[in-house]
């Protein structure tokens, strides 16, 4: 491989990496959840952390932390739909990692068991696809 090809390849890899880091992500102008969003988000989760281990066990800690399921820094919307109740430990370990579609579907499915009847369990995280509001 000649030098130009190698430099082009490095530039292409750098471009792809920078793009995937969210440098061009459209962020929700509002980052913080309202006190009402947090209260409703904690109540619908039964005031319990929503983290589920790989073995399928739900964390039993209380959730002082509410966070975006799909990270705000990656384009996640600041909506109740994208709110997840977490204990301090699981919120800190989550960081700004983008959840896999599988993890999102798993959380949606698990929520049917503990959300109050009639409460929507689907997670709509995209800022751009928000209907209304
Ligand atoms: Zn937890």
Image: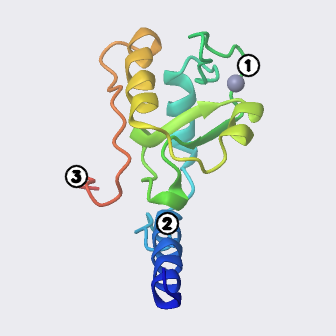
User: How far apart are labels 1 and 2 at the CA level?
Assistant: 31 Å
Residue 34: percent from left, percent from top = 54, 50
Q: Secondary structure at mark 2?
A: loop
Q: Secondary structure at mark 3?
A: loop
Q: Is residue 130 left or right of residue 26?
A: left
Residue 115: percent from left, percent from top = 43, 17
Which residue is depicted at the point 59% across and 19% down?
52
Q: Secondary structure at mark 1?
A: loop
Of pointers 1 and 3, the one earlier in the residue sequence: 1
Q: Is residue 116 left or right of residue 95?
A: left
Image height of 26 relative to 124, above or below: below
Ligand 1 location (quadrant): top right
Quarter of the image with the C terminus is bottom left
Question: Which residue lies under the disc numbered 1?
Answer: 61
Of pointers 1 and 2, the one earlier in the residue sequence: 2
Q: Quadrant of residue 112?
A: top left
């Amino acid at each position: 491989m000649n030098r130009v090809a190698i430099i082009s390849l490095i530039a292409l890899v750098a471009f792809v990496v920078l793009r995937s880091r969210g440098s061009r992500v459209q962020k929700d102008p509002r980052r913080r959840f309202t006190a009402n969003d947090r209260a409703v988000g904690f109540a619908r989760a039964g005031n319990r952390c929503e983290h589920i281990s790989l073995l399928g066990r739900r964390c039993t800690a209380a959730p002082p932390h509410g966070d975006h399921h799909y990270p705000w820094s990656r384009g996640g919307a600041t909506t109740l739909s994208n709110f997840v109740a977490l204990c301090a430990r699981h919120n800190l370990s989550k960081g700004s990692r983008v959840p896999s579609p599988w993890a999102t579907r798993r959380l949606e499915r698990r929520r049917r068991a503990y959300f109050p009847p009639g409460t929507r369990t689907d997670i709509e995280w995209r800022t751009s696809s928000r209907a209304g509001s």
